[in-house]
Image (cartoon, rainbow, N blue to C red):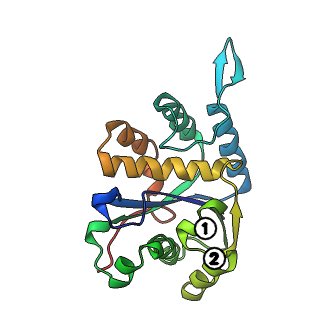
């Protein structure tokens, strides 16, 4: 089992200075390497334009929901319809957080949410190799690859087999997680109907047991 994780939204609580209300963590879960390979190929086709039955490479940049052209987002999520993966999502409405520890140390919020996402799988996620964008480790407050694996496996032994840091610029699966988290965040934060349409293309992937759509509270 393999998981690729990314986020959307910030962990700050200074709403009058631009902090977002919601923060979203999304993990795209794959059962096999073959499923990853197929999805990777589908993402590459989203970079291309078809003319007379031939595909021409058109888009070289990283897929990021907040930076990708709206029409290309439509193409991306349309291509993903034939991929085989599950989506685990945890969402925090920060206006409802009451934990003094999280309120005083907001940088801990995302790592706490990731931990919750992988310690509440009820046995569905086992021996999983987890991939995280190496550029996000500071935002996630994850100092090294052993930290998250140890803390998750201490609570739920056998959940994670390995944690790897990768470069999102060269890893389309991390980009898939970004596009997933970004669509959900835009749907919640702005009510954008396009974001809702994008979410609806993969909403069924959040079905349990391997998927989840968790509106997290710290009550």
Is 116 on the left-hand or right-hand side of 130? left
Q: Residue furthest bottom?
A: 154
| Closest to the observer, 196 or 102 | 102
Which residue does the image show at 60% across and 44% down from the upper left?
83
From the top left corner, tell me how far across and down residue 164 is, in percent.
71, 67
Q: Residue furthest front?
A: 17
Please give the residue where the numbered disc 2 appears in the rendered image: 143
Which residue does the image show at 26% across and 67% down from the upper left?
95
Which residue does the image show at 63% across and 42% down from the upper left?
62
In the rendered image, which quarter is residue 57 located in?
top right
Q: Which mark is residue 172?
A: none
Please give the residue where the numbered disc 1 appears in the rendered image: 137
From the top left corner, tell me how far across and down residue 111 is, in percent.
51, 73
From the top left corner, tell me how far across and down residue 128 is, in percent.
65, 70
From the top left corner, tell me how far across and down residue 22 is, in percent.
35, 60
Above or below, comparing residue 148 to residue 62 in the picture: below
């Amino acid at each position: 089992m393999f998981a690729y994780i990314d986020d959307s939204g910030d962990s700050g609580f200074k709403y009058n200075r631009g902090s977002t209300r919601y923060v979203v963590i999304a993990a795209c879960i794959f059962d096999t390497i073959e499923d990853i390979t197929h999805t990777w190929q589908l993402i590459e086709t989203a970079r291309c334009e078809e003319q007379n039955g031939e595909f021409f490479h058109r888009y070289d940049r990283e897929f990021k929901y907040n930076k990708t052209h709206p029409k290309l987002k439509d193409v991306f999520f349309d291509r993903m319809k034939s991929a085989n993966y599950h989506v685990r999502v945890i969402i925090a409405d920060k206006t409802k957080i009451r934990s003094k520890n999280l309120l005083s140390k907001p940088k801990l919020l995302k790592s706490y949410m990731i931990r919750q996402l992988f310690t509440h799988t009820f046995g569905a996620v086992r021996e999983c190799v987890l991939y995280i964008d190496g550029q996000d480790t500071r935002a996630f407050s994850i100092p090294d690859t052993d930290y998250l694996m140890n803390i998750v496996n201490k609570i739920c032994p056998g959940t994670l087999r390995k944690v790897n840091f990768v470069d999102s610029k060269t890893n389309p699966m991390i980009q898939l997680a970004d596009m997933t988290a970004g669509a959900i965040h835009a749907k919640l934060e702005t009510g954008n109907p396009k974001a809702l349409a994008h979410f609806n293309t993969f909403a069924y992937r959040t079905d349990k047991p391997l998927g989840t759509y968790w509106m997290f509270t710290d009550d």
